[in-house]
Amino acid sequence: MFSVFFGGRFLLSLFFGASVFGVLLILQVPYALALAAIAGSFDLIPGIGATLGIGLVCLVLLPRGLLLSLQVLISCIVLQQVEENLLMPRIMKDSVNLNPIVLFFALLVGGTVGGLVGIFLAIPLTGTIVSLLNLKALQAGRETTPPSSP
């Protein structure tokens, strides 16, 4: 479960970094490769990483002009939405089968208990625990209806 999760996360981060690099090249941003590498690296952090990376890139670009920074921000938000709503469900479908609310609380507890390392390990650990204990109610797409009586 760990290797599938981290492999999928790495693949998504590569896509995001390459896409940001393309956007930065189109907008003729200096140091496009370094800024895209920052955004892609931050995207490795589950949940909030892409947002932090985009924010940092836009702050670095702010001295170049507010318009350029806003163009990069809007473009990267669109890329982030494509990644999280179209690609992530397809790539990560076999890695973790958890309810989104459970994922949110796992990230919250992982960040509180273990800091940045806890955020990285929260989702795969939660997925492993749910699978080992066979907790159907915490898995995504599972209906927990009581058995019907005759």
Image (cartoon, rainbow, N blue to C red):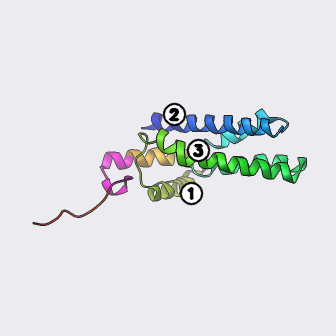
Give whichever of discs 3 and 1 has the lower sequence position: 3
Residue denoted by label 2: 7
Q: Which residue is drawn at the image coordinates 39% and 52% (left, top)?
A: 140
Q: Residue at x 61, y 50 (%)?
A: 81
Q: Which residue is labeled 1 in the image?
A: 112
Considering every residue shown, the one lying at the far bottom of the view is 149
Secondary structure type for disc 2: helix
Q: Residues within 10 Å of mark 2 (few under 14, many from 20)?
A: some
Q: Is residue 59 magenta?
A: no
Image height check: is 131 above or below 137? Answer: above
Circle 1 SS class = helix
Find out whether the residues at labels 3 and 2 contact each other: C-beta distance under 8 Å.
Answer: no
Q: Residues within 10 Å of mark 3 (few under 14, many from 20)?
A: some
Residue 139 percent across, percent down from the top left? 37, 52
Residue 108, given in percent of the width and then of the height, sits at 54, 57
Q: Which residue carries the number 3 mark?
A: 83
Q: Amino acid at mark 1?
A: Thr
In the image, residue 27 above or below residue 119:
above
Q: Is residue 58 above or below residue 5?
A: below
| Residue 143 % position (x, y) | 31, 58
* Residue drawn at 56 percent across, 47 percent down: 84
Magenta region, residue range: 129-142
Which quadrant: the C terminus?
bottom left
Q: How far apart are labels 3 and 1 at the CA level?
A: 26 Å
Residue drawn at the location 44% of the way across and 57% of the way down: 102
**Which numbered mark, 2 or 1, is in the foreground of this view?**
2
> Gap between marks 2 and 1, in whole Å?
25 Å
Kind of residue at badge 3: Glu
Counting residues from the start of the chain, the first of labels 3 and 2 encountered is 2
Q: Earlier in the sequence, mark 2 or mark 1?
A: 2
